[in-house]
Image: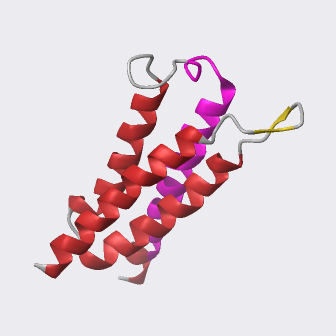
Amino acid sequence: MTSRLELGILVVSGLLLGILTSAFLLVRIGSWPFPITAVIAGIVNIVIWKIAALYTRSAWQFAPLIAWLIVTVMAMLPIFGNGSLLTDWRLFLLLGLGLAAPAFYISNSRMRDLTKL
């Protein structure tokens, strides 16, 4: 029971991370774009997945990442967001770092587990 509750809390944290990284993606320092939230999304998604993998070895360990992805994709749509992220390079950077970094880490950790056998 408690592992389901903790996994639910991780899914909510994935949702909140998606909201925050999408909201602060267009931050500028002076006239220069500064998409630091893309790097933050990659790092925090790895940490969230590692914590979720401690609670379950099933496919539910990817639920926080899927929640982050759904919120991020919804933020780029004109229905939910302002639609200014559709053609922006920072969105692709956010999706790339937010998904590619955890995917790379997960695949390397799985390969390490297989070579230990």
Name the spot of residue 81 as percent of width and height, x first: 46, 25
Q: Is residue 90 above or below residue 10?
A: above
Name the spot of residue 46 as percent of width and height, x first: 50, 64
Query: Principal SS element in the magenta part?
Result: helix
Residue 27 appears in the picture as rendered: yes
Q: Is residue 104 above or below residue 109?
A: above
In the current view of this chain or complex, which residue is farthest to the left? Answer: 1
**Residue placed at 66% from the left, 53% from the top?**
39
Q: Quadrant of residue 59?
A: bottom left
Q: Quadrant of residue 30?
A: top right
On the rendered structure, is 112 left or right of 93?
Answer: left
**Residue placed at 42% from the left, 72% from the top?**
50
Residue 108 appears in the picture as rendered: no
Query: In the image shown, does 24 or 7 lie closer to the viewer?
Result: 24
On the rendered structure, is 66 left or right of 16?
Answer: left
Q: Quadrant of residue 27?
A: top right
Find out whether residue 89 is within the magenta segment. Answer: yes
**Residue placed at 78% from the left, 41% from the top?**
34
* Range of magenta residues: 84-112
The image's colour scheme reads secondary structure
- Total numbered circles: 0
Find out whether residue 113 is within the magenta segment. Answer: no
Q: Is residue 116 above or below residue 71?
A: below
Name the spot of residue 17 as percent of width and height, x first: 47, 53
Q: Where the N terminus falls, by quadrant? A: bottom left
Query: In the image shown, does 87 or 56 lie closer to the viewer?
Result: 87
On the rendered structure, is 31 left or right of 56?
Answer: right
Q: Where the C terminus falls, by quadrant? A: bottom left
